[in-house]
Image (cartoon, rainbow, N blue to C red):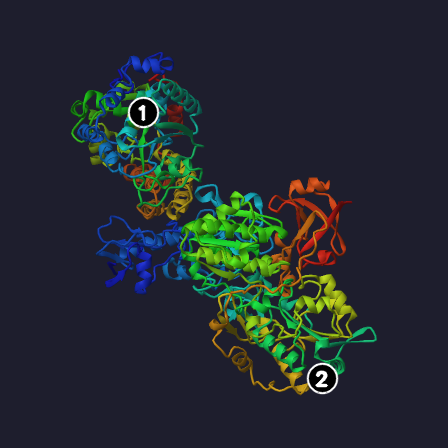
Amino acid sequence: MLEIEIDGNAVQVPDGSTVMDAATLAGVYIPHFCYHKKLSIAASCRMCLVQVEKAPKPLPACATPVTNGMKVWTHSETAIKAQKGVMEFLLINHPLECPICDQGGECQLQDLAVGYGGAHARYREEKRVWVNKNFGPLIASDATRCINCTRCVRFTTEIGGLMELGQAHRGDHAEIMSFLGRAIDSELSGNIIDLCPVGALTSKPFRFSARAWELSRRRSISPHDSLGANLIVQTKHDKVMRVLPFDNDRLNECWITDKDRFSYEALASEHRLTSPMIRKDGEWRAVSWQIALEFTVAALQEVVGGQGGQALGTLASPHATIEELYLLQKLARGLASENIDFRLRQRDFRGDAVRGGAPWLGMSVVDIHDLHSLLVIGSFLRKDAPLLAQKVRHSALRHGLRVSAVGSSAEDWRMPVAARALVAPAAMAAALAGIAAALAAETGKPVAEALAGRLPPDIPNNVRAIAQSLASGEKNAVWLGSFAVQHPRAAELHLWAQEIARLSGAALGFIGEAANSTGGYLASAVPGAGGLDARAMIESPRDAYLLFGVEPDLDFADGAATMTALDQAQLVVAASIFDSPALRQSADVLLPIVPFTETPGTFVNCIGDAQSFHAVALPPGEARPGWKVLRVLGNLLDLPGFNQDDAKAVRDEALSGDIRACLDNAIGELPEAEDPSPAQTSRLQRVADVPVYFADPLVRRAASLQKTADAAPPTARMSASTLAALGVSAGSRVRVTGTGTVELQAVADESVASGCARIAAAHPATVALGPMHGNLSVEQI
Amino acid sequence: MSARALILAGIGADADRTWRLQDYVARGGYDTLRKIVAEKTPPEAIIAELKTSGLRGRGGAGFPTGLKWSFMPRAFPGDKYLVCNSDEGEPGTFKDRDILRYNPHAVIEGMLIGAWVMGCTRGYNYIHGEIFQVYLRFEEALEEARAAGLLGQNILGSDFSFELFAHHGYGAYVCGEETALLESLEGKKGQPRFKPPFPASYGLYGKPTTINNTETFASVPFVLKMGGEAFLGLGKPNNGGAKIFSISGHVNRPGNYELNLGTPFPELLEMAGGVRDGRKLKAVIPGGSSAPVLPADIIMDCTLDFDAIAKAGSMLGSGAVIVMDETACMVRALERLSYFYHEESCGQCTPCREGTGWLYRVVRRIEEGLGRSGDLDLLCSIAENISGRTICALGDAAAGPVRSFIKHFIDEFIYHIEYKKCLVPLAVQDLGSQINVNVSPT
């Protein structure tokens, strides 16, 4: 510890602290622009100049290391003179346009100018003006306002992982620009809007729509990926105007993904379902809640009364709240149906019988910092879990974490990947078995008896390198991503991952696909004894379906098969936030429910945190919170246990036990079940990702996100050798056939495993193709 | 006539043909290195000799070379780097250009000795981008040295190895600042680093690095050959040896002159043929454009060494002596200097980025006859707000001339503001800008 005196107050600070750190500890505010607690030190704005005893000139607090016995004055005459001098320099070329600037009211420069700026400008020369840049659909540029603090440049390089922005030219010609005018729309880029201390970078969707002081700040939780980033949702007149991060050092720190930030645009989408609707004689008409609910109750009673609960299939979105999932399963079970599931894109449910508990990350997010070695199996990590990827990147770049990967796609994670096995989906289990075998050899521990007979004869060097990386670390982790969970032989991958984790002393974890991928298990939204899972409900079509928050064509492992199953059903009741052609085609009644901003609710994230939130805005039209709709339905169906007064009562009932005790990634020996993977009949296997901006109904309707590069229509991506073997030239149109046929553009992509075509799912253009995994044939048109 | 004491000794009219290895060897070159390698001279002994010699950095700051070399953590495991700063961009300075052009092997030998002393395995010579021909010549000299077994693995058959590479910049003045040079060498934008840490602990690629000026390295073989005491004896206490002065401006024979430190300024002026056309000396910038200007009466009483010039209120700097006679308008001269610093500020830290532009615009306005009362106070205030508040010394370098020009020649500035024109009539200024001089061939 070091002793330092700041403005006369003695404080003890840890070794290696800067004067800025010490001031923060002492509760002394030192004005600054370029300094940011999560970014590297630039020491370039010079706003934090302070007087240090024995130093001949003022020193920047952000970059000056504390020495024992140091005395610092932050508000002495010398310090204030230096700070005011810097402020004057910052303002000379800054346009005086606060009244029309979006940053007005929340501008660091404006705030500090009040304290350190002069009342009159001494600068009477011409001001420098810059041309605004086009940074794409998310971020607006007002270049002339820039004070060159380079926070945005450092963010994209250090946190985002790619130098998307740079400072070109020098002197007062220096300006921030993107490389060759590219758009700034990576999955985390919106954070530079928050980082910009002036109005040079503002939110394109939000700007000019409200002033900062008109907005209410309300806390919420991200409904998208499994991390559950903490949000501040800002509203004006009960309408959501924008979304910002809420600092949570255990989870998202001060960052959120672009999906978290910009998906609010979908809340005001014209496709919101604002009234209950019933199809009568092939015509859709808006009806009152009473008519819709009475119709639903009568129709459900008719099916269940006639054919029993087994005739009903209940399918819910993994983005639904705990409260909704809990009441939904209660409703289904009240109707004597165990057919309920929320794991819509999963194919292999053999693990259900031998599962230890609810799958989760197996560790806390902050633990990633201390990991030595991490194996990620089957994940489009950067797009599936952008903030987890950011933690891993940070640890890999700064703390020597060795990352290795097994998967069918090797897209750029913007971090060093020490070893990688790029294999076709059908070869993933063998690759994992190879790692286990190599680990057994490295560690001298034997492979579990039940698996020992399935070890491969040869182990390729890259697979051996993964084992070596795991064997050489002490704190290790093995994560299964969504691609592994959606894999047709997911249970076997899980079993092998567990064995690798055991042999390497690693924590086994699941990254999780959606906001409630862990929570759904805790809410019991999974089939019970004799019940059908999501796949079986589609493959053995039911007479009636109850859909909750899902888009049948886009949210399932096989959208085409789902549509067929729904089309043949006698009754389809769909509670949905949005109206859609697919729902109109398949449903008989549409019940308007609301997204996370308009209902209280809870998500249990991948680390087992139950994070509850309140409604922050009013629903449009007749839309109502899902938990209320379900409670009323339960009452109308005369089912017991639907008398909760508020969402909290539902939550308390749903999460009554100790959540931690329910989290368990263990898997037991698989029962001898039929091999669920499709027979290998062609040369080409499908690798399907769920593109980041098609992953859930909200983002699909977020207009600005839909203009980004990540929202480009799907293509058929294959390695050059695969293209050559098929006789297809890159860039040409191809006819791709799975269970159905679609036409796509072929693209050469060396990150795709040989013998595979990467074709995104969850997009209307590829629904007809059928299942996310399996065989394809491709022919050039 | 010009003294040719050390580095420029033996280099005459056919200088462009006597730069090769054989010529350098004929002048006694590489003797020092051979002796060190053969005798395995301990690094401590060399550092002690350098300290005795009073050799101070020739790049401008005048830091004692022996002391700088002793900072290098010899025992540090892994790579350590040696860098030669030939990014000579200061207006008025052209000595390193001629050293590299006419005696490149002296630099190579000096760097080899430095590598021996500090245990460096790799070195770079960062050469100013605008002197590309010189860069090419240095590359040739490197090839000669490599072919002769003087560079590379097992130098002169010993177990001493040192790789040396040339690298040319792209003409940014700020890359002469040592940490900006390192950034540029690493392939990044040339912007100074915040110090501490200093390059001796965190330099090129984050490894311990020592950076010296071209002339400093070139001096080292001569220091060791003649001995520290003898070198010191050439100059004055604390100002050892000889130094090359680049004299330019209103003199009859501008060029490089190697003089013992402590030589009176009038002697240099005389060597350079005196003030052009017999006109009256007005002012001298004694150490490159960053050094405060001194009026004739002060400089004529100065000796040319670090301490004397500092005492007179300026800096010896890199030894670039810019001479101005009575035809010079000091407002116009300052305008040119301010333009340079505005153009060359790297843009990283606020006071320099914004302040240099402000200074230039105000000085230009005064020069254009649009000056306002209060402008001179404003200029001094801006200069004060830049000084000592920046990451590197470029801010101070921009502020220095403004303050000294106004201090010593305030009458001319006031005249400009009041009468909207130069105190020195334009016709007289034209006289001074005519180029009809003999450039000394060094």
Residue linked to disc 1: B246
Q: Determine if residue B249 is in view.
A: no
The quadrant of the picture occupied by the C terminus of chain B is: top left
Is the residue A196 above or below the residue B171 in the image? below
As shown in the figure, which amino acid type bears the numbered disc 1? Ser
The disc labelled 2 sits on which kind of residue?
Gln
Mark sitting on residue B221: none
Quadrant of the snapshot with the N terminus of chain B: top left
Query: Which residue was labeled with disc 2?
Result: A290
The spot of residue A279 in percent (x, y) is 78, 75
Disc 2 is placed on an element classified as helix
Q: Give the residue at x 65% y 69%.
A: A533
Of residue A367 and residue B174, the one placed in the foreground of this image is: A367
Extreme right residue here? A281
> Circle 2: is it few (<14), some (14-19), or many (20+) Cα within 10 Å?
few
* Place of residue A255 in the rendered image (x, y in percent of width and height, measured from the top left): 48, 60
**Residue A767 sits above or below residue B126 on the image:** below
Where on the picture, by quarter, is residue A312? bottom right
Q: CA distance from mark 2 to mark 1?
A: 96 Å
